[in-house]
Amino acid sequence: MARALDPTRGLRERAESLALCGSVDNRSALAEECLAAGLPEEAVMLYRISLVGAYENDPHLRFAFARALVEQAAWDDAAEAVARLRRDHPCHRPNDARLLRARVLEATGEAGTALGEYHELVPAFVGLEARLRYGLLLERLGRVDAARAVFAEALALAKRNPTPIETEARWAKLARERLGATA
């Protein structure tokens, strides 16, 4: 609600905090606000600056950096960052890292490999994002019936497990829209 009333408030507050204290925590908080505001380039820059010294191999920062690169659509850098994250920190948010990898594969033209990654990820992934991305890829590949089944399953899950989380509501809405579009 606060974001809707004042969409730049979080950015301003985080930028002020960073100006007062240039800590990694403040830089990361501003980077997250940048991602939420649709400014992935700024987030990438903030994470890149943070990944030095004692924080060079921090798994939380490495994951956030890889996610920011994916959101920026910097696919070559994202592929490298995701591979490094999975190699150096295989136990850190493994399903989220797999989702990033699947997104990179899909964006770089490796649709078949991405499809397999999504297919394996869907049962283990908490939330609707992996399922919807899988359905969208199926749809793009012309497998409309399979995509419809994935979207219907996502809607059923959303109805069984309603959540106030905004991103989950957006994925459920997308599933409804795609079912209507493929009818």
Image (cartoon, rainbow, N blue to C red):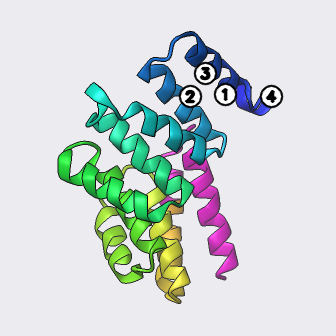
| Marks 4 and 1 close (CB-CB < 8 Å) | no
> Which residue is the site of mark 3?
14
Q: Is residue 129 magenta?
A: no
Q: Position of residue 25 (x, y in %)?
A: 44, 21
Quadrant into which the C terminus falls: bottom right
Query: If you read the primary sequence from the N terminus, does the residue marked by circle 3 or circle 2 appear first?
Result: 3
Give the structural element (helix, strand or loop) at label 4: helix
Q: Position of residue 162 (x, y in %)?
A: 53, 44
Question: Mark 4 or 1, which is nearer the eye?
Answer: 1
Give the structural element (helix, strand or loop) at label 1: helix
Give the structural element (helix, strand or loop) at label 2: helix
Q: Position of residue 155 (x, y in %)?
A: 54, 61
| Marks 3 and 1 close (CB-CB < 8 Å) | yes
CA gap between label 3 and label 2 equals 5 Å
Crowd around label 3: few <14 · some 14–19 · many ≥20 (10 Å): many
Q: Is residue 164 magenta?
A: yes
CA gap between label 4 and label 1 equals 14 Å
Total number of numbered discs in the rendering:
4
The kind of residue tagged 4 is: Leu
- Identify the magenta region: 156-183
Q: Main secondary structure of the magenta part?
A: helix
Give the side of residue 39 with respect to residue 128, left or right: right
The kind of residue tagged 2 is: Leu
Image disc number at residue 11 = 1
